[in-house]
Image: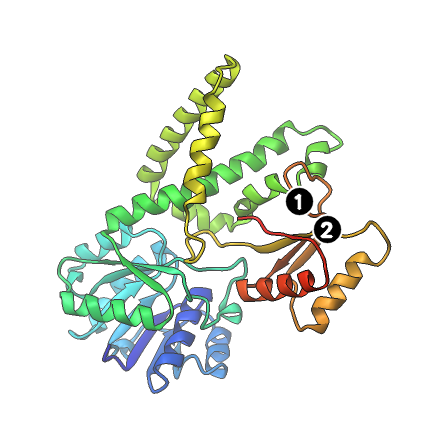
Amino acid sequence: MNKNRFGFLSLGLIGGSIALAIRQICPDAHIVAYARRQSTLDEALAAGAIDEGTTQINELFSDCDMIFLCAPVAVNNTFLEQLKPVLSDKTIITDVGSVKGSIHETVTKLGLDSHFIGGHPMAGSEKTGFANASPLLLENAYYILTPTEAVSQETVAEYYSFVKKMGALPLILSHQEHDYVTAAISHVPHLVAAALANLVHDHDSANETMKMIAAGGFKDITRIASSSPDMWESICMSNTENIANLLDDYINSLQTISKAVRAKQAGFTHDLFAASKAYRDSFSDLPRGPINKVFACYVDIPDETGSIASIATLLAKADISIKNIGIIHNRDFEEGVLRIEFYEQTTLDEAVVLLQSLHYSIYQRK
């Protein structure tokens, strides 16, 4: 991709990570950025992620080969309106939003179809802001591209190749298919997880017995309920129809399950679990999707003073960083009494090899 001048509107976790990745693969690129706070720009300048920063959207962006819109969907739509007067004919605009319909509508309304390739890097973290940006954030993550029909195939092919150079896995979809797919595999699951967490909250006793023993499986399947309320409300308000339609189908399936369970319908739940197990077990474990994977293992340890400290010390001496560690008290569906979570797959793999070499029993969930 013969581009050497890049612009960023907003520099959070995703925008900052893309800027840092571009710096690695195109060290001579000139990168300009807009941010609301000068402190963010100062931080990005100090990190070498950008060459110029501004708190105004102005002519600094007029000579950019590519501009990344890295704010929430509604804000990106406003950015487009502000950019239009200063755009050059050569500029390609992309975004990083998880809903594409709204921004494609705005692009068409503003007559910018020939400039736009929608983008959605399916990567993230529970941490936010430029301070947590990393050039490795995109590695092995799907990066969906939603080009307009007015953008040349050559330009799309160039950007596709560029995404691969950043370490991501590009996939081209229409913006309609993108929004339907992400509603099913990301947006609805977040709502379901939130509803499950609230179900237990609403039915718990005064002494919170349910909360006390809600470890292991329940905690895992509701983990994404801890996501940002502001971000997820924005997503639900932007991809409303797809989410509502899929929720209706899910509710219908739950009602069917409820009726079968109430009637003690022999074989129904067995077939349900068998089909879901076969389908889930067929998922690839390599690329990253829209819901972040947890890198954790479970360890059997003796119930004696110092057991946890011993393992933590062993890992620390091997320069293996632990993200979280804790005892599993509810072991109905778990093997291993100690759960250790790591920041990445390579660190988890190193820890497993080390602990197994010391004859610890290690379990990993798929």
Q: Where residue 279 appears, x then y in whole percent?
A: 41, 39
Q: Which residue is mark 1?
A: 335
Which residue is located at x 23 percent, y 54 percent? 104
Task: Give SS at disc 1.
Answer: loop
The disc label shown at residue 296, or none: none
The numbered mark, 1 or 2, whose residue comes first in the sequence reads 2
- Identify the amino acid type marked 1: Glu
The reply, left or right, for residue 191 in relation to residue 25 is: right
Q: Nearer the viewer, residue 160 or 60?
A: 160
Decide: marks 1, 2 in contact (CB < 8 A)? yes
User: For mark 1, does the 10 Å Cα neighbourhood hold few (<14), some (14 to 19), or many (20 or more) residues?
Assistant: some
Which residue occupies 73% across, 42% down?
A: 329
Identified at 66% across, 63% down, the residue is: 322
Q: Position of residue 290 (x, y in %)?
A: 42, 53
Q: Residue at x 21, y 73 (%)?
A: 91
Residue denoted by label 2: 300
Residue 188's quadrant in the figure?
top left
